Image (cartoon, rainbow, N blue to C red):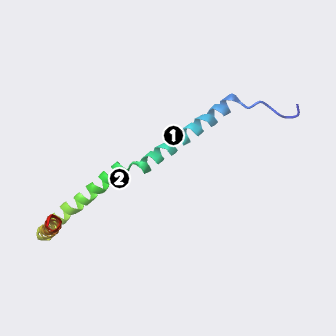
Amino acid sequence: MSGSRAPDPAAIQADIDRTREHLGRTIDEIGTRLDLRGKAREHLFRVRDTVVETYRESPPLVLGAAALVSAAAGLVIWRRRR
């Protein structure tokens, strides 16, 4: 045999471990990207925090917006029932 040696078992095991770790990270990333419920919950919390912060800075603005949304929802419900 001219210079061909059997691979080192420790090197093979290290390669397997690196591949396994890389595959685990890839699967975790895919899971994170597909977690729509988690993303929706995170978005809802950000919106809530924005509303609370806006209310603290300008309560009449938030109350006016809430009244406007309530009036629009009431109008839609009233028109559907007619």
Picture residue at 23% right of the left edge, 58% below the top? 49
Residue 35 locus on image (x, y percent): 39, 48
Residue 74: quadrant of the picture: bottom left
> Which residue, given by chain and number where applicable, does mark 1 sit on?
24
Picture residue at 46% right of the left edge, 43% below the top? 28
> Along the horizontal axis of the image, is 40 left or right of 10?
left
> Along the horizontal axis of the image, is 43 left or right of 63?
right
Asked if 16 appears above or below 71 in the picture, the reply is: above
> Along the horizontal axis of the image, is 50 left or right of 5?
left
> Which residue, given by chain and number where applicable, does mark 2 sit on?
39
The answer to whether the residues at label 1 and label 2 have Cβ atoms under 8 Å apart is: no
Quadrant, the N terminus: top right
Asked if 10 appears above or below 40 in the picture, the reply is: above
Q: Residues within 10 Å of mark 1 (few under 14, many from 20)?
A: few
Picture residue at 61% right of the left edge, 35% below the top? 16
Residue 66: quadrant of the picture: bottom left
Residue 82 locus on image (x, y percent): 14, 67
Q: Nearer the viewer, residue 11 or 60?
A: 60
**Circle 1: element type:** helix
Residue 63 locus on image (x, y percent): 12, 67
Q: Amino acid at mark 1?
A: Gly
Q: Residues within 10 Å of mark 2 (few under 14, many from 20)?
A: few
**Circle 2: element type:** helix
> Along the horizontal axis of the image, is 67 left or right of 43?
left
Q: Nearer the viewer, mark 1 or mark 2?
A: 2
> What's the CA distance linking mark 1 and mark 2?
21 Å
Q: Earlier in the sequence, mark 1 or mark 2?
A: 1
Q: Amino acid at mark 2?
A: Lys
Asked if 69 appears above or below 31 in the picture, the reply is: below
